[in-house]
Image (spheres, coloured by chain):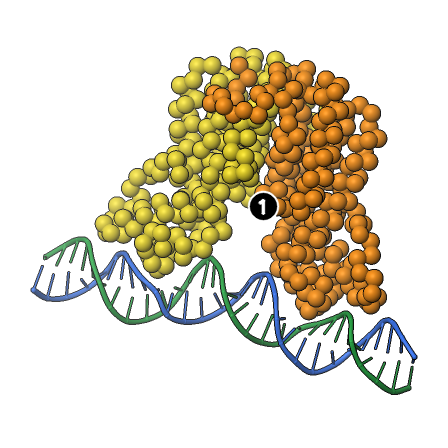
Chain colours: A yellow, B orange, C green, D blue
Amino acid sequence: MTLAEHATPAPRPGRRADAERNRAAIIEAAGAVFAECGGGVDVREIARRSGVGMGTLYRHFPTKDELLATVLERQFNAWLTDAYQRAVATEDPWQALAGFFEQLLGTQAGNRAVVESYASTGGPSASCIQRCYALIDQLRTRCVDAGVLRPGVTTEDLFLLSGSLSQAVLTTAESHPGQWRRLLRISLDGLSSRNAEPLPVRGMGADTPASTD
Amino acid sequence: MTLAEHATPAPRPGRRADAERNRAAIIEAAGAVFAECGGGVDVREIARRSGVGMGTLYRHFPTKDELLATVLERQFNAWLTDAYQRAVATEDPWQALAGFFEQLLGTQAGNRAVVESYASTGGPSASCIQRCYALIDQLRTRCVDAGVLRPGVTTEDLFLLSGSLSQAVLTTAESHPGQWRRLLRISLDGLSSRNAEPLPVRGMGADTPASTD
DNA sequence: CATCAAGCGGAGCGGCCGCTCCTGTTGTAC
DNA sequence: GTACAACAGGAGCGGCCGCTCCGCTTGATG
């Protein structure tokens, strides 16, 4: 994975050196295996790839789910930090928003576990999602202030859109690499204020189909 | 499911009446169970719900995958037939396209197996996908002729978009019912010719981010 | 009613996978 | 070097699940 693994650098201080090394190896291997195979992989595969026995793995992580959560959270936090820095470094609000999506879809194109987590309840921990929401909301606000984002678009809309597009990236990754950029382009154009009238403010009161006309 | 089950009405003529009844019961139960639980359900659950033993089930369908494929194909074909009729009955090309998406997302919002099939290779049989492509292409052509669809949008774009939005519908079905209409609206607006400039014609030669500006 | 093949049911087999247990090993403190 | 607690490892347990096997039942036929 391109997502760097470095958050909470020294989790437990009073541990033996080899144990610490093994823990790191497990996290790294698990990150790779989960990314390429999804959360359904056999735990033995992770143990094998990290050069560690089952007992060792389960002493460090009491449960497979907990291991997955840990890995996901580390990757996601690292990615979020990176995304945040890019966002503040980009002056043009629209470019910042577009770059966010671009980076999101580009980096997690190969990470099955991350994309799967969008579908399941919870996924990464609530705090991760909260941070992500905060970032998206900041990007959105900048765009709104600049008048480039279509009025009525909510943070939740953008979050859902990112999840939806991530799915598309994953399913088309090997059959049509790069095709997701077209979908992203279409969606972004649908979000632009120069292109469309305001979105209804949350209400799905109107039962009419979502046509533009 | 709202998707009616009626295609290839009498599959095997020389069979005993009870066998025919059981086969129908299995298909119906499997359709419901797959829809609400996804393709990963225990086969025993399907047997239980259809009031049939394991042996019976496996005599009618040599494999779980084959059962799933049969069910998916029936549902999908029935849905496609319906979608086709609606399409030809709608004069306005844009309304026809929008209605297609609306119907697709509305009816399969609760069908896990169908949505999952978008992600896996194959999914429904190739002929189903071909028919679906044909329908989408027809809708697209009508819109292009009427000048309401943004130039450069391919049939594949629309197909991928439908799959992507389907995922979003499923993941937000119970947490935010109806929210998918907002995403659909955004996407449709991104597809409208009055809202955006032509899409690049297939080439992802440009490495630039997909921003509108 | 008799006959019998077609059909039925569900216990059970084999494989997978999450997790544990216990024996052997190794880092660390003195 | 010695002693000990922390750690490593992997065989194995239990549960799940796809699929099969075989004795019993039942609808069709004359």
Q: Splitting the image into 4 quarters, where does residue A58 fall?
A: bottom left
Residue D8 higher or lower than A124, as above or below: below
Question: Do we see residue A72 in this rendering?
Answer: yes
Q: Is residue A177 left or right of residue B21?
A: left
x then y, percent, for residue B160: 62, 34
**Kind of residue indicated by mark 1:** Ser
- B164, A57: nearer the viewer: B164
Instruction: Bin the neighbour count of mark 1 within 10 Å (Cα to Cα): few under 14, some 14-19, many 20 and up.
Output: few
Q: Is residue B199 above or below residue B68?
A: above
Estimate the x, y position of residue B153 in percent, counting from the top left: 64, 24
User: What's the residue at 54%, 38% (across, down)?
Assistant: A175
Q: Is residue B29 left or right of residue B40?
A: right
Chain designation of label 1: B
Q: Which residue is identified by label 1? A: B120
Image point (51%, 17%), residue name:
A94
Vertical order, A134 against B15 (above or below):
above
Residue at 46% across / 52% down in the picture? A41
Q: Position of residue A156 (x, y in %)?
A: 58, 29
**Tag 1, which secondary structure?**
loop
Looking at the rendered structure, the number of numbered marks drawn on it comes to 1
At horizontal 57% and vertical 35% (from top left) the residue drawn is A168
